[in-house]
């Protein structure tokens, strides 16, 4: 049922988008302040009353999309064109959210990882009138440093958009010892969430490069020598599972302490949406695709071209 704010937001949207009025004119018409109009227009978008669509022919079927789909056996590939490097993250979020809105339906379970890309997707999701959806955190997200994984905010965004029940994994993604991890994951509540993650209908995740600035390497989980091992052996990570250029586990001792879905289990999920971009991640993305981790891909054009080039080497 619509409340007063919903109705006012719809009125503002009609005047602004259909009537062609400026925000100042809408404010005068509705007898509110201009900042209030801005908030009402944002509310109209978030609530799904307004859908803004840009038809970019470059993002539809073209040779680059065809190459990605054929080389990596993808069901779908969305290649976004971005004006500047700073636009990569928000455009990936927009396109990733649009794809998920097509894929997620009633009574589905959706597995979600964390990171800046995942947060961007959550921010761009529209509220959908779905029922019976469950959102499951695919890996631990508690940080031991000043840097945040934003896992709670990301899950909240997905849950709000899909009107879903949330299953959060309230743990660090990497434990100090394999023994400590093995004890914790035996807890029946934790074991249940991990099992839910292994059986999701749709998994949404990103791929990161194994680099010094990588979020997973800066959360206080690892000793300096372990970080050095990862930097020397890994090309990237998916769900904080670091892999080599050949798709092998980069540092088994670290992987054994990692809490979350394993890549072998991820690869069995029927719909696997990889959203990633940026030239520094091209090799990590290419290897993840070669490993068969994704059925659907959202990527920026420059990185997509680099991934195709790498696959031809």
Image: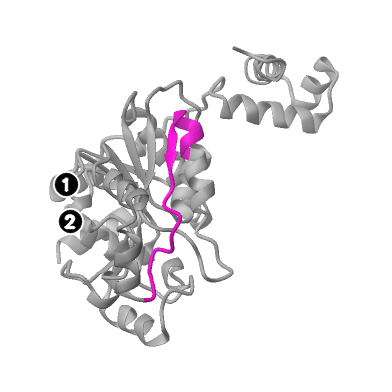
Q: Secondary structure at mark 1?
A: loop
Point 64% across, 31% down: residue: 42
Q: Can you give x and y, in whole percent of width and height, for residue 296 in the image?
A: 26, 42
293 relative to 242, above or below: above
For residue 9, which quarter of the picture?
top right
| Figure check: 224 above or below 196 | below
Q: Locate residue 195, reporting x and y percent.
A: 27, 47
The residue that appears at 19% across and 52% down in the rendered structure is 265
Who is closer to the viewer here, 88 or 248?
A: 248
Mark number for residue 268? 1
- Whether residue 90 can be seen here: no
Q: Is residue 208 magenta?
A: no
Closer to us: 190 or 110? 190
Is 138 or 24 nearer to us in this picture? Answer: 138
User: Label 1 near label 2: C-beta < 8 Å?
Assistant: yes
Residue 60 as seen in the image, left or right of residue 32? left
Q: Secondary structure at mark 2?
A: helix
Residue 5 visible in rendering: yes
Q: Does residue 128 appear to the left or right of 34 in the view shown?
A: left
Q: CA distance from mark 2 to mark 1?
A: 7 Å
**How many labels were placed on the picture?**
2
Question: Mark 1, residues whose alpha carbon is within 10 Å: few (<14), some, or many (≥20)?
Answer: some
Q: Which residues are magenta?
A: 158-176
Which residue carries the number 2 mark? 264
Q: Position of residue 163 (x, y in %)?
A: 47, 28
Q: Is residue 161 magenta?
A: yes
Q: Which corner quadrant of the image does residue 184 belong to?
A: bottom left
Q: Dividing the image into 4 quarters, which one contains the C terminus?
A: bottom left
């Amino acid at each position: 049922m619509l409340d007063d704010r919903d109705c006012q937001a719809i009125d503002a949207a009609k005047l602004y988008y259909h009537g062609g009025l400026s925000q100042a004119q809408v404010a005068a018409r509705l007898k509110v302040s201009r900042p209030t109009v801005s908030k009402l227009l944002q509310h109209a978008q978030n609530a799904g009353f307004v859908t803004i669509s840009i038809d970019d022919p470059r993002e539809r079927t073209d040779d680059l999309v065809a190459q990605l789909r054929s080389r990596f056996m993808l069901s779908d590939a969305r290649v976004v064109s971005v004006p500047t490097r700073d636009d990569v993250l928000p455009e990936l979020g927009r396109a990733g959210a649009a794809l998920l809105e097509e894929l997620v339906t009633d009574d589905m379970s959706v597995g979600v990882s964390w990171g800046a890309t995942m947060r961007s997707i959550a921010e761009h999701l529209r509220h959908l009138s779905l029922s019976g959806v469950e959102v499951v955190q695919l890996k631990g997200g508690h940080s031991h440093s000043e840097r945040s994984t934003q896992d709670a905010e990301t899950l909240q965004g997905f849950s709000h958009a899909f009107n879903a029940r949330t299953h959060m994994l309230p743990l660090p993604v990497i434990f100090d010892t394999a023994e400590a991890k093995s004890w914790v994951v035996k807890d029946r509540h934790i074991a249940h969430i991990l099992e839910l993650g292994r059986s999701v209908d749709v998994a949404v995740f990103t791929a990161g490069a194994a680099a010094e600035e990588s979020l997973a390497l800066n959360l206080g989980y690892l000793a300096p020598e372990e970080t050095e091992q990862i930097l020397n052996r890994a090309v990237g990570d998916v769900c904080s599972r670091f892999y080599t250029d050949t798709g092998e586990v980069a540092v088994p001792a670290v992987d054994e302490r990692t809490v979350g879905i394993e890549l072998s289990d991820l690869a069995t999920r029927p719909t696997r949406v990889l959203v990633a971009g940026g030239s520094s991640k091209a090799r990590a993305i290419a290897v993840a695709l070669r490993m068969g981790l994704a059925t659907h891909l959202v990527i920026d054009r420059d990185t997509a071209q680099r991934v195709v080039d790498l696959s031809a080497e």
